[in-house]
Image (tube, coloured by chain):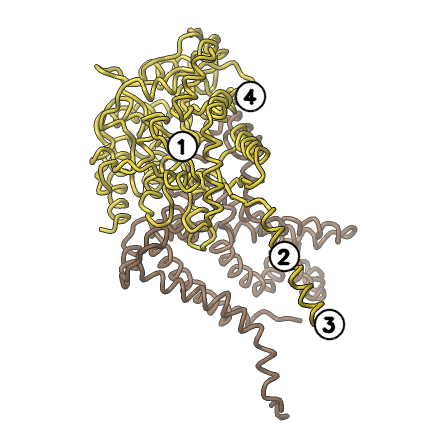
Amino acid sequence: MQSVVFPNKILPYALVAPQIVLTVVFFFWPASQALYQSMMREDPFGLQSSFVGLANFSNILADENYLHALRVTVVFSLATALLSMGIALLLATAADTVVRGKGFYRTMMIIPYAVAPAVAGMLWLFMFNPAMGTFAYILRRNGIPWDPLLNGDQAMSLVVVAAAWKQISYNFLFFVAGLQAIPKSLLEAAAIDGARGARRFWTIVFPLLAPTTFFLLVINTVYAFFDTFGIIHSVTGGGPAKATETLVYKVYNDGFVNLNLGSSAAQSVVLMVIVIALTAFQFRFVERRVHYG
Amino acid sequence: MRSILTSAIAATTLLLMASSAVAATEIAWWHAMTGANNEVVDQLAKEFNESQSDYKVVPVFKGTYPETLNAGIAAFRAKQPPAIMQVFDAGSGVMMGAQGAIVPVADVLEKGGFKFDKSQYLPGIVAYYSKPDGTMLSFPYNSSSPILYYNKNIFEKAGLNADTPPKTWAEVFDAARKIKTSGAAPCGFTSTWLTWIQTENFAAWNNISYASNENGLGGTDVKLAFNAEPFVKHFQDIADLAKDGTFRYGGRTSEAKQLFTSGECAILTESSGGLGDIVKSGMKYGIGQLPYEDGPGRPQNTIPGGASLWVFAGKSDAEYKGVATFFNFLSQTKVQARLHQVSGYMPVTMAAYEETKKSGFYEKNPARETPLLQMMGKPPTENSKGVRLVNLPQVRDIMNEEFEAMLAGKQDAKAALDKAVERGNAAIQQAIGN
């Protein structure tokens, strides 16, 4: 084997320096700040602070509301991931059979991904807000007591739909790519053997898409966990009665609304542990199975 | 050659110094005013900027009241606070706890060479924005008081007298039921700010205790008391009306105003400062005083709400001078009188009140004096001077969560208020560091 040692001693460091700087500035520095803050108790303006050890952690873990937020997060993430992946798969298989204007359909499908989360939230809020939403009006007119300002389940459905809608595009792209990677010869052979559309899908397409599906499941869960703050903030603000308060939203709420920065920092440290675990999981199981061709 | 360079540098430096002396000092003003009230803010800044050339007030909209407060605190921590920040009533306790982060408005005015005469301002408002020792901390920009608005067309349709608004809560609830059952409107009654109106002002107006220690004005270690019998009855009545939609919930701050202006709900309790948007909607509305519980000696008086302007510490002398000049501009009688007459907020100086009276404005618009009469009609008791908690915004959020669960039918009023008091007390203890 050829040796891959650079003769230059400085160049390799210079080449990785930008990446190292970015990681230090955007990850290690804020993370260390969070760790430090999580062991302090401070007044809102940062005028006085005192060291409290792990008290902030024991407080949040004993807090019934924190466990509630954890349950809300799990329900929200799973529902969002399953809904957006289900619809994306349906659309991807449909788009796969389109003969003319494929490019047009695909481009149209990708548009929601370019919408900022807060804007996506506002779009859905305008449609379903009980005070001014057109769809809310139609629902109520048809005898459905639509009131997401008070009904927690309805509020949850609304944020799930908004969050899922935004993520469909991303999933769609990956499913389309996955579908194209399935050898046509397999499908043709099955067709000659007499397998109909549904059977071909479940016995050939779906299993062969499994790596993509698994990858998307992890990505979507991470998305629902961490990237949906804007949607929740604009649609429900975590309400009613904490029904849509996810872990990330609680970090914001306790830190920036209730101005309890120690508790907020402790919660973000817990979240950091979760992110690290999810990333490790993704590397261990997902990266090995996805084939980049 | 060297000498040319030196003189060039000297000339440039002089030029720069000269231009910075000419440029007006910018004064950032963060506020939370929307709709008609936002236009007033912009108009005032414009008039002030045109009236002199040394300072330029730049108003910046920062979201709802709680969002503005949080933005200001975050900016202070990042060492880039605005000179002036509008803070709502509930945030006053938060700001007062921040000695060192703010400069009392009395000091700012003196720095600017103006005399600060407390007696010029309405006493109830001055007391609310002062420290227990009497130092006035913030400038009362928009003071309001909750009142009752009703839709005259719907009242007529439902066979109610459109010229006499309901006076007591029992009358409001009866009227709301009548409106709903007669089909005159899909919803009888709604309210903005269940916390400020139905709890804090409900307590003051009916002269019952909201919290220990003079509702927090006497000290920071406070025990909440709003789970007493009258509150439970009041909220149970609202919860019962919510079951069939006679009462509709709009949201935690002023969202319910929309339910009223859209004609969906016939009666609204909302800040007197909400008037601008209601006038703008072009509807036929009437105004009544805030309803009270029938009982001897009632109603007492309402507490000031709205917001005041706080000045952050760590600014240059030029900026403080500018702020003082601006506050002096704002307290001019003609500005205050106009502010009151176009916006529904109360005038904060006695002179502006007298001026408005003299002009015959109240004879033409008798309802517009309602918020002032409500607040100043009687000398306040220890239940009705105001509510001040170091973390009132947080306590209000806790209450809102329990109210939402109650209105969704998950718990009754007693459970909601008991839980809100218990959680609120725990949050207060944590905030004061016990």
Q: Chain letter of disc 4?
A: B
**Chain at numbered mark 2:** B
Q: Quadrant of the N terminus of chain B?
A: bottom right
Chain coloured brown in this rendering: A
Q: What residue is disc 1 on?
A: B140
Label 4 vs label 3, nearer the camera: 3
Label 2 sits on residue: B14
- Badge 4 and badge 3 in a common chain: yes
The picture's colour for chain B is yellow
> Circle 4 — which element?
loop
What's the residue at 56%, 33% (across, down)?
Answer: B42
Q: Which mark is residue B281?
A: 4
Q: Looking at the image, do the residues carrying marks 2 and 3 touch, with CB atoms under 8 Å apart?
A: no
- Alpha carbon distance from label 2 to label 3: 20 Å
Cα–Cα gap, marks 4 and 1: 28 Å
Residue B1's disc is 3
In this rendering, which labeled residue sits more in front, label 1 or label 2?
Answer: 2
